[in-house]
Image (cartoon, rainbow, N blue to C red):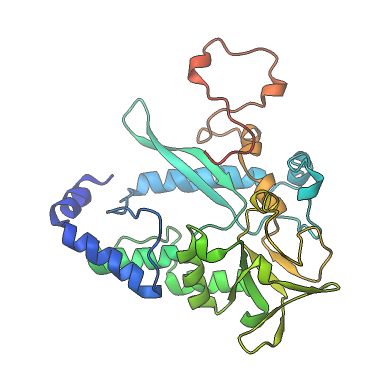
């Protein structure tokens, strides 16, 4: 988006550099991501960065209000998806923006997705470093818009995910994690935090206690679950042989709680009044249809695409 930086990058780009870039990512943890990795980062000008931060602030303000949980009480309508020990606010918050152009030719963000669920926090570190090592990235450019650095970013993630627990008592929980498209992020997470990547089928239960067996067969108590399981997908996997179900009352802390996956989703788009959020309505609450229906999209409350 910054024309002179884009021109310099494109002129110096080669297929050989890109292949070296991909190989460096694969070599870091012995795994090549199954998703396509872009040949280039996006170079965002300061004016657009400020608009993005303002948009995030507008959205966060709504989610942080005390009445937010009450306003989203109907987000989880299926009783089988309700999990005990829900906390008062989400631990994680992701926002995806499309970049539009206004009538003056200026870039501005438009929200297209948000979720109260972890993203590829640790892969982002690997990706950023790989770009810098294999391409000509100006030194003043950073992936940390708040002015922090990788060390501070990692420390924040460690504080949130591991907390005061011993890393061995913290697990990253998924369904068949090695088969997930996001597996590369799991491996980088394990590298930096030292926590165990665990399939839900390997999680054991004794009363209210959860544990797993280490490589020596020792029982290791689970105190905190860094949850990467998409709960409604798990609910459809009747083929899994497991001892633990999310509805079980257990002595464990969710990082973050599964309920927020449902509360913070397309379900809440109509709650926002911001120039950075497309105006959205609940169909059931419309008194009459707009005349220009060709300018609208009808979406399920819960959908990935």
Name the residue nearer the viewer: 12 or 106. 12
Instruction: Give me the residue at 46% from left, 42% from top.
Output: 97
Instruction: Give me the residue at 81% from left, 46% from top.
Output: 79
The residue sitting at the front extreme is 239
> Whole-percent x and y of residue 140?
29, 62
Give above or below for 277 relative to 169: above
The residue sitting at the left extreme is 11
Name the residue nearer the viewer: 264 or 103. 264
- Judged left or right of residue 219, residue 150 is left
- Judged left or right of residue 88, residue 9 is left
Q: Which quadrant of the view contains residue 170?
A: bottom right
> Whole-percent x and y of residue 153?
49, 69
> Whole-percent x and y of residue 150?
43, 71
The residue sitting at the right extreme is 207
Quarter of the picture containing the N terminus is: top left
Instruction: Give me the residue at 17% from left, 56% from top.
Output: 13
Give above or below for 218 relative to 299: below
Total number of numbered discs in the rendering? 0
Report if residue 269 is visible in the image.
yes
Report if residue 135 is visible in the image.
no
Instruction: Give me the residue at 59% from left, 76% from top.
Output: 196
> Whole-percent x and y of residue 86?
77, 57
The residue sitting at the top extreme is 291
């Amino acid at each position: 988006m910054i024309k002179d930086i884009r021109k310099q990058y494109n002129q110096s780009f080669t297929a050989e550099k890109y292949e070296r870039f991909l190989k460096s990512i694969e070599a870091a943890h012995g795994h090549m991501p199954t998703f396509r990795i872009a040949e280039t980062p996006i170079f965002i000008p300061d004016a657009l960065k400020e608009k993005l931060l303002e948009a995030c602030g507008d959205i966060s303000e709504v989610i942080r209000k005390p009445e937010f949980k009450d306003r989203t009480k109907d987000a989880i309508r299926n009783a089988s998806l309700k999990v005990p020990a829900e906390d008062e606010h989400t631990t994680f918050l992701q926002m995806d923006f499309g970049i539009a152009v206004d009538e003056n030719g200026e870039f501005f963000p438009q929200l297209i997705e948000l979720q109260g669920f972890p993203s590829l926090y640790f892969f982002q570190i690997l990706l950023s470093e790989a770009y810098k090592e294999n391409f000509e990235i100006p030194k003043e450019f950073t992936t940390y818009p708040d002015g922090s650095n990788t060390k501070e970013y990692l420390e924040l993630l460690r504080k949130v995910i591991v907390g005061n627990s011993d890393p061995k008592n913290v697990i990253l929980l998924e369904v068949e994690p090695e088969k997930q498209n996001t597996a590369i992020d799991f491996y980088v997470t394990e590298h930096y935090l030292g926590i165990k990547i665990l399939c839900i089928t390997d999680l054991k239960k004794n009363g209210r206690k959860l544990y797993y067996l280490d490589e020596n067969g020792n029982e290791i108590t689970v105190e905190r679950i860094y949850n990467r399981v998409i709960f409604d997908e798990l609910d459809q996997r009747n083929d899994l042989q497991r001892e633990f179900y999310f509805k079980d009352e257990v002595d464990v802390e969710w990082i973050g709680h599964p309920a927020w996956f449902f509360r913070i989703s397309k379900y809440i788009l109509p709650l926002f009044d911001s120039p950075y959020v497309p105006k959205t309505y609940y169909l059931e609450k419309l008194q009459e249809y707009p005349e220009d229906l060709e300018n609208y999209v009808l979406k399920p409350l819960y959908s990935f695409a």
